[in-house]
Amino acid sequence: MRVAARYSHLNGEEYLLVHRPELWQEVLATIEQVDAKSCKTKQSKESRKQHKLLYSPVDMNSAFKAGFEALGWRERRNTFWVTDDARILRNVYGLRDSHQKSVIEASGKTPILSYNQTDFIKERVAVEVQFGKYAFVAHDLFVKHLSFYVSDIIDVAIEILPMKELEQEMSSGVPYYERDLLNVIRQGRGVPAVPLVLIGVAP
């Protein structure tokens, strides 16, 4: 695969070039080593694309996973406790997860264990590869990456998305770079409040 486009939000790419150039090169190399042709294995059952061979999100995710894990990138979870009282949540969010639970219990509320998970993290850089449904991108950008950044687990995030030219040869409902670039830009320069790089990939 190739990097067809990229966008640096809050100097995400610049941070990588200065502070983590070797990790930035690993990300680019991992993208390049994915053999797109070998991932074109999904037989479409949709009326508009019937009998057409499409790119398989499962196969592409597996190829990215193999590439990143070979370089030492690993999945990571950020656990935390929640409850139904906004005032309590504001007071506990910055605390360690073990302390969050005790504060919620001391307030007479029931603590609920929750978590955010990201695909790959290495040396405070997070990568999400998103070939799923388009709604998942907003969750990545405005929930996952932000959660890891605010929790001081990462310094920058990378979101890998298909370009429109790739999305057109996938099942319906898949995200594409051009649309999610607009979704970031129209929020304003400071939202989401986490340095990140959007990468659009194509065969």
Image (tube, rainbow, N blue to C red):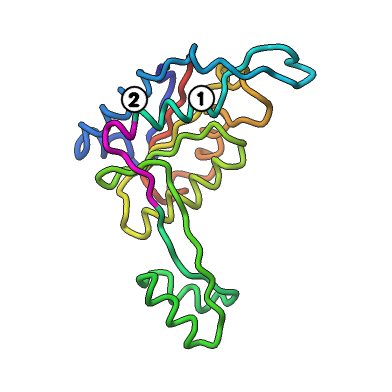
Dividing the picture into quarters, in which one does residue 167 lie? top right
Is residue 157 shown left or right of residue 22?
Answer: right
How far across and down, in percent of the image, does residue 135 sit? 61, 41
Q: Secondary structure at mark 1?
A: helix
Tell me which label, 1 or 2, sits earlier in the chain.
Answer: 2
Q: Nearer the viewer, residue 41 or 165?
A: 41
Kindly identify which residue carries mark 1: 59
* Mark closer to the observer (1, 2): 1
Amino acid carrying label 1: it is: Asp
Q: Quadrant of residue 164?
A: top right
Range of magenta residues: 68-76
Q: Residue at x 59, y 31 (%)?
A: 175
Q: Residues within 10 Å of mark 2 (few under 14, many from 20)?
A: many
Q: CA distance from mark 1 to mark 2?
A: 15 Å
> Is 137 situated left or right of 168 in this image?
left
In this rendering, the answer to whether 145 lies above or below 168 is below
Residue visible at 57% across and 19% down in the picture: 55
In the rendered view, would you say 172 is above or below 158?
above
Kindly identify which residue carries mark 2.
30
In contact (CB < 8 Å): disc 1 and disc 2: no
- Mark 1: few/some/many CA within 10 Å (<14, 14-19, 20+): some
In the rendered view, tell whether residue 77 sits above or below residue 18. below
The quarter of the picture where the N terminus appears is: top left
Query: x, y percentage for residue 178?
Result: 54, 27
The amino acid type, in three-letter code, at marker 2 is Thr
Q: Residue at image x 39%, y 35%?
A: 197
